[in-house]
Amino acid sequence: MKLERHSQTGILPPSQPERPTPSQGAWVQWVLIGIVLVYIALLLGIPAVNIFYQAFKDGISPFFETLIQPDFVSALWLTVLTALIVVPLNTFFGIYAALAIAHKKFRGRTFLLSLIDLPFSISPVVAGLMFVLIFGRQGWLGDWLQAWNIQVIFAFPGIVMVTAFITIPFVAREVLPVLEEAGTDQEEAAKTLGANPWQIFWRVTLPNIRWGLLYGVILTNARAMGEFGAVAVVSGNIIGRTQTLPLFVEDAYKSYATPSAYGAAVLLSLLALVTIFAKEVLERRTSFR
Amino acid sequence: MTLSAASPSINPLKALAQLSWPWRVTFIYLLFMLLLPLTALVLRASTVEPGEFWRIATDPVAVSTYEVTFGTALIAALINGVLGTLAAWVLVRYRFPFQKGLEGLIDLPFALPTAVAGLTLATVYSDNGWIGSLLAPLGIRISFTRLGVGVAMLFISFSFVVRTVQPVLQEIEKEVEEAAWSLGASRWQTFWKVLLPQLMTAILTGVALGFSRAVGEYGSIVIIASSIPFRDLISAVLVIQRLEQYDYTGATVIGTVLLLISLVSLIAINLLQAWGRRHEA
Amino acid sequence: MGITIEGVSKRFGDFQALYSTSLTIETGSLVALLGPSGSGKSTLLRLIAGLELPDTGRIWLTGRDATYASVQERNIGFVFQHYALFKHMTVRQNIAFGLEIRKASRAEIRARVDELLELVQLSGFGDRYPSQLSGGQRQRVALARALAVEPQVLLLDEPFGALDAKVRKELRAWLRRLHDEVQVTTVFVTHDQEEAMEVADQIVVMNQGRIEQVGSPAEIYDHPATPFVMSFVGQVNVLHPESVLSCQLPGIQGSQQVFFRPHDVVIETDPCSGGMAAQVQTVLHLGREIQAELLLQDGGSLWVHLSREQYAKTPIQRGQWVYVRPKAIKAFPPADKHRAVRNSSVFV
């Protein structure tokens, strides 16, 4: 266990102490670092390493066998397709919402922001339930949809809708602070130089918010591909038809197909790694420009 | 101001036509994607007669899920209140090897799909898993018990505390601490009397965020827990079980209780943050 | 005609930023809008630019009614206090922006940008980003960007406000020379009277949303139209109507307020000179001149400035009694009293 070993032997005194501290043994510092390292190792580090260990402990072939399973392929395809619809939709909305709210003071601003944030705090299961109550067989539109033979719940449209609901806040939340910080000066300057609103958006506003926007898009994508609870409620988990990748992981695990579960888990973990890496890079971009 | 659309006396369509495009898109999208589903739940809940509502909401199984969900989430959030603050402290104040990697690891719960988190936690903490096998001889079982629910909730809420406390800690000026030292305060006294009060809102906000997230968590818990009533069944799983039995009313009532708790936490978080800004010029 | 403003007013919520205002600015002139913060000068500038729309009145730019024209149609150059450079573009790209919007050809753009870089003395800096420039350099890029589109009118909002004193001084002289070269109608906003005097042909003094006076720097200084102008432009002593000194002055009616500049005071040591008796409180040597505070017998106090020569002739000391006689006084009827800024008679 890599991380654990650091926590036992790898602690060094700080190479450049941040500040002069009054006399107190360096042991306090070591103990604190030790506690944190052990806790994080137990809670995050070991489970993270375990994903890759379980997937590859019997060599690389079980992993590839998972990748060619028809159920896996259809789950992957469904997940990608959902993200392909939801991510552009919420990117579009997030930019518009941020543009509408930025630089304005009005009554109800805090309320509107809380409303946009709401999907963060609502349990995904409850979010799924809401859509079932509208589109389900006993729902508001149930009879009407049945008459027209349109299936939303236990079908692709339902998956897309709950995923969109769950990922509403990310882009707006990442773009808004960048817009606020950039101020309106540059846009006004572009106006005085003759640029129309479209030109101002593409040539001034968008370049200013690009890194925040990109991070928001990446977060939206990570959540859209990884969402479990809300999708579990509306999808019906029909193998090969309405099973997304996270549902495939659970299903494989519960049916004792552990290698398949870990094969899919590795893929989803790579998505998480890309997200974390992007955060590191993009945060530096925004702060050093 | 463009928000005149909110006043009911104006024809809403006319008001909408007067808004700029960003406003129109924002309103329409929020209306259909957010308010409509929310209304569906509230309306459905309001069709349940109050006595019936109360009976379903306080059904012994339901009550046991509240106890498991909220009790465990609270304990997990409080543990992370302490350890998350400590982690933020260590990351901001000390320099040690592999710090960058640790930073990335802390973002893991935000980025990792919850199904994957549940899967790996269930394996690692099972009786023959890396950590579970060390605890099994002591008679401690984690996976498929309430402790498992707790571990999943610790996992999900940890990052919230660290990421809320860290920036506040970073911004505390060195001079404030040095002033305390110059007045004769020891390092412990400085921490308890000068730093901790300044960090308190951030810690509480982080705990509230973590709690709120843990209460709503489904994916990782449904995998690590056995979901047996009165043992480790949580409210979110109960909602799904009710739906699977086509008991829409039962699902709606439990779902409404969960929604109310989310809203209360949201308001509490907003109040906390407003209160935290009271010293700002 | 350069810019004509007729009965223009603007209100923000409860705040009347600009009362009905009329003003004419000649083609090719260099005009300063001078006033304290909240005087409406920036609002007037933004109204001319079209960044705000007036509640009432009309605005003509070079003979065309531009009251409801959008910012884009007005063909103006605007320089913002904090530069508002496009951070993601190089200096060249910033300057080229307006030309690209106007679909100028590549060669044309290159030539024009080179020309402007030369004009603002930044020839070697074309490929830098704004973050790699000093404040003064950024301000010059902002100017070049505004001038690139050959605007009919150049508008500058506190152009030197964010710069340090030395750079500010240099840029003022440079702006003056630039204007002589380019000859574009220029309006700039400032709260610094020295800056207005130094740079502008014409000064528009504003206060509380109204124009107090329009005139050349000399007119403004020597013939202020209102107590506000007198006290805002340069330092001033104010005598209360009840003051003994006030009623000794020729031609002053009892209720008038009397203003005079600290250097317009004759000081004599001879009691028979006819001056008012005053006791010296402090004497400060400020390099070029000597500043003294005098206490009148009725309790009022005065500031006087003496040149080194005057001081050599009458070397006053603390505690000494002297006899003062203001020359070049200005008297204003008391109706204007409430608009005079008492604080502005405080000295540095």
Image: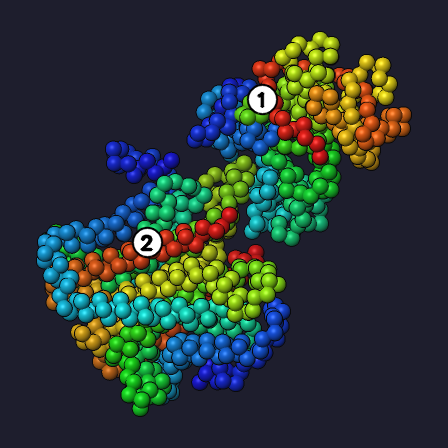
* Structural crowding at the residue carrying mark 1, measured as other residues with C-alpha within 10 Å and reported as few (<14), some (14–19) or many (≥20): some
Give the x, y percent position of residue C64. Answer: 53, 22
Name the element at disc 1.
helix
Give the x, y percent position of residue A247. Answer: 26, 71
Q: Is residue B35 above or below residue A272?
A: above
Name the element at disc 2.
helix
> Residue at the location (49% across, 82% down)?
A7
Which chain is mark 2 on?
Answer: B
* Residue C4 can be seen in this image: no
Along the viewing direction, whichever of A214 and B256 lies nearer the viewer:
B256
* Structural crowding at the residue carrying mark 2, measured as other residues with C-alpha within 10 Å and reported as few (<14), some (14–19) or many (≥20): few
Which chain is mark 1 on?
Answer: C
Query: Are labels 1 and 2 assigned to the same chain?
Result: no
Along the viewing direction, whichever of C319 and C291 lies nearer the viewer:
C319
Q: Name the residue carrying label 1.
A: C339
> Residue at the location (38% across, 73% down)?
A269
Give the x, y percent position of residue A245. Answer: 29, 71
Q: Is residue B269 above or below residue A256?
A: above
> Residue at the location (29% across, 85% down)?
B140
> Residue at the location (21% across, 50% down)?
B39
Query: On the rendered image, what quadrant is the C terminus of chain C found in?
Result: top right
Q: Amino acid at mark 1?
A: Arg
Q: Name the residue carrying label 2.
A: B267
Q: Is residue A226 above or below residue C46?
A: below
- Residue B276 found in image quarter: bottom left
Q: Amino acid at mark 2?
A: Ile
- Residue B180 found in image quarter: bottom right
Query: Mark 1 and mark 2: span between their CA atoms?
Result: 49 Å
